[in-house]
């Protein structure tokens, strides 16, 4: 599995649409069902809703007091959940009016990851201190129970059946590992899954739940057997910078990745082989996600804008078929600091002295 990527970056490919308005780095992107709107959050302390077809922001921005890292939307498309750097609060917004509905303030540390369960009943948030908190949506964010992962949790996602949680665990400078927990009991059922040489920024399940994919600061992507926890094949190589975000195509056959090396790259989800040429950004890319139809990907990062691309293999004569799917993106806690002599000035920081 996986061949080292030898193709050059496609410098001729241009985004179909560019969404501009954020005033700082974009960290998360989520498509709504139907594929005509997306939600973004950024370091400019705002959540924004966009019309992809006309490239315009819809309504007012939803604001926090600090830069944003956590973003989730309910499966029914009615609510947005967001979390900031230091306010330790999850805000729940009405999707259409952008009005604040609730604030959940029962967190003891900075929140940088939020995901929704497949049935919309639970939200899971990850705190900087390594705590994973399972919250009841219908009970105003009441805590069902908490899990202590033992180290910082940079990404979390539900299994397709909603019964398990896969988590990327590890602090800066440590080889990242993956834990799998039972949602109902909170017990560790698999892991640690070891193999990456540095922190893991993103973890997500295959559509059938038999595999896990992970992306790391070590510039590689790995595939794992979700029953045994064993690595499948060799690491997927090609990126030349930390890989921050992964998204699976709606049919489960392709994976797209975003990296600090300024590229978005496509992979065969079964073999790990590269597909087509990478797409070029002007700066590092933090977030990428497939559209519900699989025809487009949306990506963004250090350039403060969202780029919408048609996937290279798409047959434009084909009638789009929207398949409902949900993407789990990386949500590491980042501190920007220029490091002389390195290819990336962004370092993962999971410590009490992070500014």
Image (tube, helix red, strand yellow):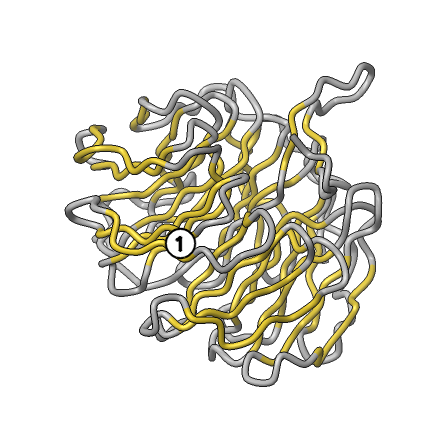
Coordinates of residue 8 in the picture (x, y in percent) = 62, 26
Quadrant of the rendered image containing residue 141? bottom left
Please tell me whether residue 346 is drawn above or below residue 224 in the rendered image: above
Q: Which image quarter is the C terminus in?
A: top right
Please tell me whether residue 45 is drawn above or below residue 151 in the rendered image: above
Q: Give the residue displayed 36% in from the left and 69% down from the top.
A: 137
Please tell me whether residue 257 is drawn above or below residue 285 in the rendered image: below
Please, which residue is most extreme toward the bottom here?
185
* Left or right: where 151 falls relative to 7: right
* Left or right: where 11 falls relative to 167: left
Query: In the rendered image, is residue 293 in sight?
Result: no
The 10 Å Cα crowd at callout 1, few under 14, some 14 to 19, many 20 or more, is many
Q: Give the residue displayed 47% in from the left and 79% down from the top.
A: 161
Coordinates of residue 344 in the picture (x, y in percent) = 71, 25
246 or 96: which is nearer to us?
96
Q: What element carries label 1?
A: strand
Query: In the rendered image, is residue 66 in sight?
Result: yes
Find disc 1 in the rendering and name its residue.
Answer: 72
Coordinates of residue 14 in the picture (x, y in percent) = 39, 23
Q: Give the residue displayed 55% in from the left and 21% down from the top.
A: 283
Coordinates of residue 100 in the picture (x, y in percent) = 25, 48
172 or 197: which is nearer to us?
172
Quadrant of the rendered image containing residue 72? bottom left
Please, which residue is most extreme toward the top here?
340
Q: Which image quarter is the N terminus in?
A: bottom right
310 or 161: which is nearer to us?
161
């Amino acid at each position: 599995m996986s061949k080292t990527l030898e193709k050059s970056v496609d410098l001729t490919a241009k985004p179909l649409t560019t969404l501009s308005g954020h005033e700082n780095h974009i960290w998360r992107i989520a498509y709504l069902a139907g594929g005509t709107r997306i939600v973004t959050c950024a370091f400019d302390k705002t959540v924004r809703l966009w019309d992809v077809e006309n490239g315009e922001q819809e309504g007012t921005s939803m604001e926090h007091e600090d830069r944003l890292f956590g973003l989730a939307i309910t499966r029914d498309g009615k609510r947005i959940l967001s979390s900031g750097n230091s306010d330790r609060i999850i805000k729940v917004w009405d999707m259409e009016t952008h009005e604040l509905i609730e604030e959940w303030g029962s967190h003891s540390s900075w929140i940088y990851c939020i995901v929704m369960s497949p049935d919309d009943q639970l939200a899971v948030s990850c705190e900087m201190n390594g705590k994973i908190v399972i919250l009841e949506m219908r009970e105003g964010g009441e805590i069902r129970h908490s899990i202590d992962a033992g180290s910082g949790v940079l990404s979390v996602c539900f299994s397709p059946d909603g019964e398990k949680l896969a988590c990327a665990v590890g602090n800066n400078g440590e080889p990242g590992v993956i834990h799998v927990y039972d949602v109902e009991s909170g017990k560790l059922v698999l892991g640690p899954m070891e193999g990456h040489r540095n922190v893991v920024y993103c973890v997500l399940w295959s559509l059938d739940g038999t595999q896990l994919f992970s992306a790391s600061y070590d510039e590689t992507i790995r595939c794992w057997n979700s029953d045994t926890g064993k690595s499948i094949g060799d690491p997927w190589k090609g990126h030349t910078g930390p890989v921050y975000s992964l998204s699976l195509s709606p049919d489960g056959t392709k994976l797209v990745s975003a990296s600090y090396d300024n590229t978005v790259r496509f992979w065969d989800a079964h073999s790990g082989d590269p597909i087509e040429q990478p797409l070029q950004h002007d700066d590092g890319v933090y977030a990428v996600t497939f559209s519900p139809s699989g025809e487009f990907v949306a990506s963004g990062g250090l350039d403060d804008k969202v780029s919408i691309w048609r996937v290279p293999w798409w047959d434009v004569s084909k009638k789009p078929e929207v398949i409902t799917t949900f993407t789990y993106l990386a949500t590491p806690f980042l501190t920007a600091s220029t490091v002389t002599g390195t290819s990336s000035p962004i370092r993962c920081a999971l410590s009490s002295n992070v500014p």
